[in-house]
Image: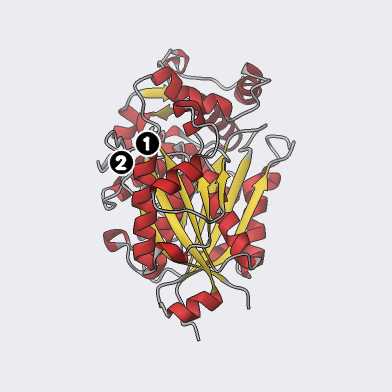
Amino acid sequence: MNDVYIIGVGMTPFGKLTHMTVKDLTRAASDAALADAGIARDAIGAAFFGNAGQAALEGQFMVPGEIALRAAGYSGIPIVNVENACASASTALHQAYTYVKAGMAEVVLAIGAEKMYIEDRARMFGVFDGAWDVSRGQANLDAIIELAKDMPLPPEALQDTGQRSVFMDMYANLARFHMKTFGTTQRQIAAVAAKNHHHSTLNPLSQYRNDLSIDEVLASRLIAWPLTLPMCAPISDGAAAAVVCHVDYLKKLGTRRAVRIAASVLASGSDRRADEWDKAMCRIAAFKAYEQAGIGPEEVSLAEVHDASAFAEILQTENLGFCAPGEGGHLAASGATSLGGRIPVNPSGGLESKGHPIGATGLGQVFELVQQLRGEAGERQVADARFAIAENGGGFHGYEEAAACITLLARPEAIH
């Protein structure tokens, strides 16, 4: 028996945390995870540290994990730095999982920490410019724009809406392609954002906690048509952590709150055509995770997906097998992905509203799913949650993310 479990999770609030440094965030999240696990710091045999922006924003080009974790009280153990764009934290968890599964240590810490807010907005948004093939520059975006070049656009789609992440232009044009191909509507995309903003009112750690109707989402400031501001993830600071252990250590610990990692899959993309929906990286990785866990998508109780834009949630619900390609907009509009629906998606509020500190985001998703599977999510609790899945993407290459990590978790069970 070689099962791997999460025995502790911790997360800071996500948002504009001007009073906290990367070191402060790292200590807060790791201390919370240790306290949740009920273990001391010296039980940790190794640590995997996720961060994507500190090199560009602070000049900490090397050893960020050794620096941040030393300040949090860790020394002498193996520390591995993980950079996989917005999938850095989930990749750190995947590495911790494989390290424990390989028998290299009984207990391992996975942590992601990110400090995104700085005064220089050009540099702040410029971090995202390094998350695609920099040698191709504008050609990356041009290839996406070409997909929906013949689609009729409303006049407002042509206006200059000001400074933003280049990824919002990528998502906007992918959304247009989906709309052109399947008839997805802007209102369906707005339904995702309204749902997630409502979910975030129930999450005390969310960056935003304001309820928005579909009409209010549609009437908000345009970022890149069809995306308005509430449909886009904000700039965020924050950290999240998980303590991972082998089943033998869990037996000694005796906790009944451990969540089993039923599957962990890390993937990169391919040179597929944009319309080869069945070859999407996240879809292939998700079904590989289902195979590892011995379940199908119909057995999943809830999901946290990488909704850097509201459209991305629509796309990922399709990739995860909750509906057929092209039907994600209808799924969202039907209420099926809301709390109380058939398959609640992003009960935390998602990246759009909970926040998106890029190097910490994946473990923020896992924090939510662990709480849900333990039955500790309070007002946003999904009833009788048994299996939960997280999809976390990073960077961009071709017509999809450059990297993606799928984490499938199973609710606590008795350990004998």
Distance from label 1 to label 2 (Cα)?
8 Å
Reply above or below: 368 against 169: below
Q: What residue sits 44% from the left and 54% below the top?
A: 74
Q: Residue reaching furthest right?
A: 271
Q: Is residue 98 visible to the viewer in this orientation of the structure?
A: yes
- Name the disc covering residue 369, or none: none
- Residue 76 is left or right of residue 34, and the answer is right
Task: Give the left or right position of residue 198, taking residue 341 as reference.
Answer: left
Q: Position of residue 218 (x, y in %)?
A: 35, 30
Foreground residue, 68 or 193? 68
| Element type at mark 1 | loop
Q: Which residue is drawn at 63% across and 38% down?
A: 402
Instruction: Identify the disc placed on residue 207.
Output: 2
Figure check: 125 above or below 344: above
The spot of residue 336 in percent (x, y) is 43, 55
What amino acid does circle 1 point to?
A: Ser
Residue 273 location, x and y as percent? 72, 35
Q: Which of marks 1 and 2 is nearer the N terminus?
A: 2
Q: How many labels does the image show?
A: 2
Number of other residues with Cα within 10 Å of mark 1, as a class: few under 14, some 14 to 19, many 20 or more: many
Q: Are marks 1 and 2 in contact (CB under 8 Å)?
A: yes
Residue drawn at point x = 48 percent, y = 48 percent: 362
171 vs 136, nearest the viewer:
136
Q: Determine which residue is flagged by label 1.
A: 236
What is the secondary structure assignment of the residue under circle 2?
loop
Residue type at tag 2: Gln
Residue at position x 66%, y 23% from top?
143
> Would you call the spot at circle 2 few (<14 residues within 10 Å), some (14-19), or many (20 or more)?
many
Q: In which quarter of the image is the N terminus?
A: bottom right
